[in-house]
Image (spheres, rainbow, N blue to C red):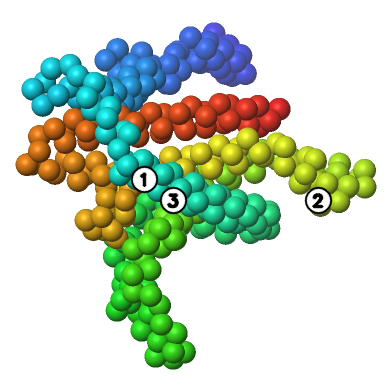
Amino acid sequence: MTGSPARSHAAVTTDVQGRGADAPHPKAQLQRATPQSRRRISPLWGTSLFFLYVAAFLVLPTILIAVSAFQDSDGTFSTTNFSVLTETNTVEAFGTSLLVSLASALISAIIGGAAANALEVLAQTRPLLRRLVTSLCSVLAQFGGVMLAFAFIATIGITGVLTQLLKTMFGVEIDPTWLSTLPGLTLVYCYFQIPLMIIVFLPALDGVRPQWREANAVFGGSTWTYWTKVAGPILWPAFLGSVILLFANAFSSFATAAALFSQRSILVPLMIQSNMSNELDTTQQGSAAMLALAMIVVVAIAMALNWMLSAKSERWSRQ
C-alpha cells in the first residue's frame, strides 16, 4: 500500500534538495572548465614592458650620447669635446635657454595654479566643468611644435589675422619680428605650459581637505591666514615641483623654437641641431653629443628635485 501524498511529496523534496546540495555551482563548473592557459596575466608583464620601453628609448640613447661625448672623430676616447662647454656661444645659449625656460615656467605656474584653484572651487557645484576643462587641457598641453608656431604666426605674425585686424580697426601695429624674440618665444611656450600646470597641480589641490578651511574659519582665521598658514605650506612642495617640471619641459623643447628662429642657434637644442647637420666639420658631432649630455644632466637634476618634492607633497594626501 502506497504512502500518503504528503509523505511522498516530502520525500521527493528531500531528495531534490539533497541532489541540489551535492551538485556543483554553475560558476564553479565554468571555472573548472576554463583551461590553465587562460590564467590571469601577471602585473609584472606590464611593468616589464614599461621598463623595456624605458631601456630602449631612454637609457640606451643616453648611454650612446655619453659615449659619443667622450670620443673624437676617429672614435677614440678623448676629452676635447669639453671645450665646447666653455665657448662664448655655448654659454650664451645655455643662459638663454635657462632664462626662457624659467620665465615660462614661473608665468605658467602662477596663471595655471590660479586657474586650477578656481576650477577646484567651481567643480564643487559644476563637476562637468572640471571634466571638460581637464580634457581640453590634456589636448592643449600636447599642442606644441611646428603646428603651434605656425598657429601663432598666422595669428600675430607679419600678415596674421589679429595683426591685420588691429591695424585696420584701431591703427595699432604689432612688430612683425616680435614672435622671433625671447618674450615672443616665452609667450608661445606658455600656451602649452599653462594647461600642463593645471593638469599636474589639480591632484595637489584635491589633497587639501575642506575641513581645514572650516577649522581656519572656526578659529577666526582669514583667507590670508588660510593660504599662508594652512594651505600654502601644504601646497608649496607640489607647486615648486610643478615649476621644476615646467622648466624641464620648456628646456628640452625644440620644434617650436626651431620654427620661430629658423637658422639662429640661440638655444641649446637649436645649437645641437646645427652641429648635427654640419657635414663639413665632422668634429661637430662630438660637440653636439657633449651639449646633449649637458642638457640631460640639467633635466635629470630637475627631475630628481621634482621627485623629492612630489614625495613630500604626497605625504599629506595619504593622511
Position above or below: 49 against 221 = above
Which residue is drawn at the image coordinates 44% and 85% (left, top)? 172
Which residue is drawn at the image coordinates 37% and 17% (left, top)? 44
Q: Sequence-wise, which precedes: disc 2 or disc 3?
A: 3
Q: Position of residue 99 (x, y in %)?
A: 46, 48
Callout 1 secondary element: helix
Q: Nearer the viewer, residue 52 or 61?
A: 61
- State if disc 3 and disc 1 touch (CB < 8 Å): no
Report the quarter where the C terminus lies: top right
| Circle 1 or circle 2, nearest the eye | 1
Residue position for label 1: 92
Q: Nearer the viewer, residue 229 or 31?
A: 229
Q: Which of 197 and 105 is in front in this view?
A: 105
Taking 156 as reference, is 136 left or right?
right
Q: Sequence-wise, which precedes: disc 1 or disc 3?
A: 1
Q: Sequence-wise, which precedes: disc 1 or disc 2?
A: 1
- State if disc 3 and disc 2 touch (CB < 8 Å): no
Q: Can residue 165 be seen in this view?
A: no
| Residue kind at label 2, given as amino acid type | Trp
Report the quarter where the N terminus lies: top right
Which residue is drawn at the image coordinates 45% and 13% (left, top)? 23
Residue position for label 2: 224
Residue position for label 3: 100
| Circle 2 or circle 3, nearest the eye | 3
Q: Position of residue 258 (x, y in %)?
A: 27, 54
Picture quadrant of residue 126? bottom right
| Residue kind at label 1, given as amino acid type | Glu
Q: Where is residue 145 in the image (x, y as percent from the top left)?
A: 30, 54
